[in-house]
Image (cartoon, rainbow, N blue to C red):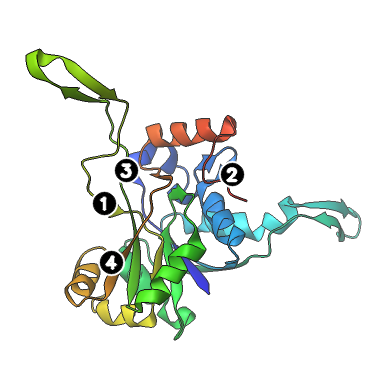
Amino acid sequence: MKVLLLAGGFGTRLAEETSLRPKPMVEIGGKPILWHIMKLYSHHGFNDFIILLGYKGFYIKEYFANYFLHQSDVTIDIKSGGIEILNNTSEPWRVTLLDTGLHTMTGGRLKRAQKLVGNEPFMLTYGDGVSDIDLMDLLRFHKMHGKATTITSVQPEGRFGALHIGEGNRVLHFAEKPKADGGWVNAGFFVCEPKVFEYITGGDETIFEQDPLRNMARDGELHAFQHNGFWKAMDALRDKQVLDSLWEDNLAPWKVW
């Protein structure tokens, strides 16, 4: 099953990093967050990736063009230019890098990949969020309901500690950054049937999270897989710092491989 990764946005809320490189290439623990996401999929047996490029897509192309060399011990014959691979630790990945336009929106990027996907179900996620989600459980759930799309939902942590206040303004309980107000949000990690392309009726300006998903929900073609484990999107510099800290302290919940 192919895995599509949305990796073309400008990442303006992380401008400290994305002025130089695309957001999926911002590093966590010395590796691009895109690599961390791909390692999760690979751990569950998904190794065929289509990366949907846009902003500074050449950066991602160059990374994967040199990945095999960077993962290998080599002997280089300077005179002849020959390279002998002594040992290679690369993952068994097949990576297709598809330019989908600088200003194309998420639905438009997905539509441009339709021919590469073919008439088969596929997985889809964003290139800026990590999780410890069990992708095989997600796939089983998707197959069970048999509809066009499964979206993974999570309850994110609140940004602030919560006070439970009783009579006389006495604090009865304090929770450090509890789950938010009970609402579930889109965490990405989709499973889609080819039917999803029928809902992307516009061009490059189509935002997948708007009319396509709303219309699937209206038609009963969208189901939510509720994930109660770890998930965090890297939206701002603060998020990168949190993820870096977890990785450096060997406490990264998404490192399941």
Q: Amino acid at mark 1?
A: Trp
Q: Write down the residue under mark 3.
A: 156
Using the image, tell me which numbered label, if any, was put on residue 208.
Answer: 4
Tell me which numbered mark, 3 or 4, is placed earlier along the sequence.
3
Of tags 1 and 2, which is closer to the observer? 1
Q: CA distance from mark 2 to mark 4?
A: 28 Å
Q: CA distance from mark 3 to mark 4?
A: 21 Å
Tell me which numbered mark, 1 or 2, is placed earlier along the sequence.
2
Badge 4 density bin: few <14, some 14–19, many ≥20, Cα 10 Å: some
Q: CA distance from mark 3 to mark 1?
A: 8 Å
Cβ atoms at labels 3 and 4 below 8 Å apart:
no
Of tags 2 and 3, which is closer to the observer? 3
Using the image, tell me which numbered label, if any, was put on residue 184.
Answer: 1
Using the image, tell me which numbered label, if any, was put on residue 31.
Answer: 2
Q: CA distance from mark 1 to mark 2?
A: 29 Å
Label 1 sits on a secondary structure element that is loop
Give percent across and percent down for residue 192: 38, 73
Label 4 sits on a secondary structure element that is loop
Label 3 sits on a secondary structure element that is loop
Q: Residue at x 35, y 54 (%)?
A: 187
Tell me which numbered mark, 2 or 4, is placed earlier along the sequence.
2
- Residue 222 sits in which quadrant? bottom left
Give percent across and percent down for residue 123: 45, 69
- Residue 216 sits in which quadrant? bottom left
